[in-house]
Amino acid sequence: MDPRALTPALRALRLCLHLMVAGLLALAALRSDTAAGVTAAVVTAAVYATGSLLPSVRRSPRAAAGWLVVLGVAWLALLWLTPDGLWVAFPLYFLQLHLLPARWSLPSVALTAGAAILSYVRQGDPLNPGVFIGPLLGAAVAVATVFGYQALYRESERRRRMVEELVATRAELAAAERHAGTLAERERLAREIHDTLAQGLSSIQLLLRAAERALPGDSPAAGHLARARQAAQDNLAEARRFVRALSPADLEHGSLAGALERLCRPAPDTGVRARFTVSGAPVELPTPYEVALLRIAQSALANTVRHARASRAEITLSFMGASVTLDVVDDGEGFDPAAPSPTAEGGFGLPAMRARARSLGGTFTVESAPGQGTAVAVCLPLPVEVAA
């Protein structure tokens, strides 16, 4: 464990472990009848203190294992010289479980408990159940404590990462919502300018042209009508420039077909190969139509990438005289269109696409079934001036 992650409670537990080892070694030294026993207790204390102060022991499993081997040899020498060294086995359990991986720590704990039991048996004192139960029970308590704490620590770390991911996701979602709101307002303004101001100026221009044709050639009003028609034409061009400026960035540098072709370019880590085709003779569509068809294609392809687990997708733009259709087909898992949406986003994608199509007088259909892929189709009737 990273020492920087230690909380005040864990620092207190580590201090208690140090005090326990120091107290038990001091007890063994005081109760020893020989100078060798005192020397063994001092050597064991020195080895323990050295390992506790070395940063490499906390950072390197190999260094920790080497330190535990040296500490174990010193403890065995103490155990051979004085039976009171048996009590040091309990803090050794915690050190072994904490510093070694499970495949080594459990056998080390078992060997330490066995050495403690054998040291008592070697003294020749009468045997009783406590001789075996004491070391084994201490080992069991240490194993349960350390493994239980490690499980709680892993769960705490998992929850911490989840909270961090949630905070990051909320920030990304807020930024995406702000961006989506900006784009939606730009598209709304573009539709309003196109449907009101641009259409009105276009009608004024047509009426002025008709009035020019109805006037005699030498009429003094002809010049005024020509200047008025030119002013209407200039303002209509300016209004259309505003509409283009407010349109999505994907449509700024080309046609709808070009934007859809760029949408199908291979993207890393999606796993979906998309293809775009055009059917019929392309005509210039009003900006609201291009925006709606592009947004529907983007949303449908995003659903394919996120939810369908598809390998291929096909986008087809068809011009059929009085209407234009867009089809997005994939070979993914499919779903039941009549069932509630299982997506985490709440299923707003399909209703939003349907609302876009209906706002322009079109139709929106979805054909899908579990295991049979999905086909999304939108058909928009073209305005009379475009269809003609």
Image: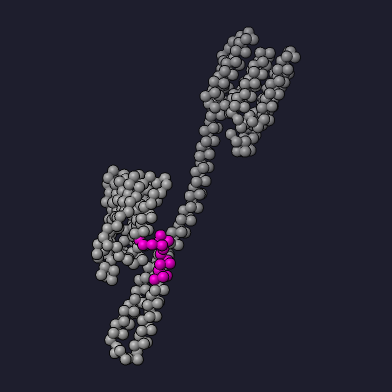
Residue 313: image location, x then y, percent: 32, 49
One can see residue 383 in this view: no
Q: Is residue 319 magenta?
A: no
Colour scheme: one colour
Range of magenta residues:
240-256
Is residue 158 shown above or below 320?
above
The residue furthest right is 35
Is 213 left or right of 230, judged from the image as shown?
left
Q: Looking at the picture, tell me which residue is in the foreground, 267 or 383.
A: 267
User: Relative to 181, is 44 above or below?
Assistant: above
Q: Residue at x 71, y 15 (%)?
A: 37
Which residue is painted at 38% across and 55% down in the image? 262
Query: Where is residue 174 drawn, in percent x and y?
Result: 48, 55
Q: Position of residue 26 (x, y in %)?
A: 71, 22
* Magenta stretch prevailing secondary structure: helix
Residue placed at 27% from the left, 58% from the top?
A: 279
Report if residue 246 lies within the magenta region: yes
Residue 352 position, x and y percent, is: 35, 58
The quadrant in which residue 321 appears is: bottom left
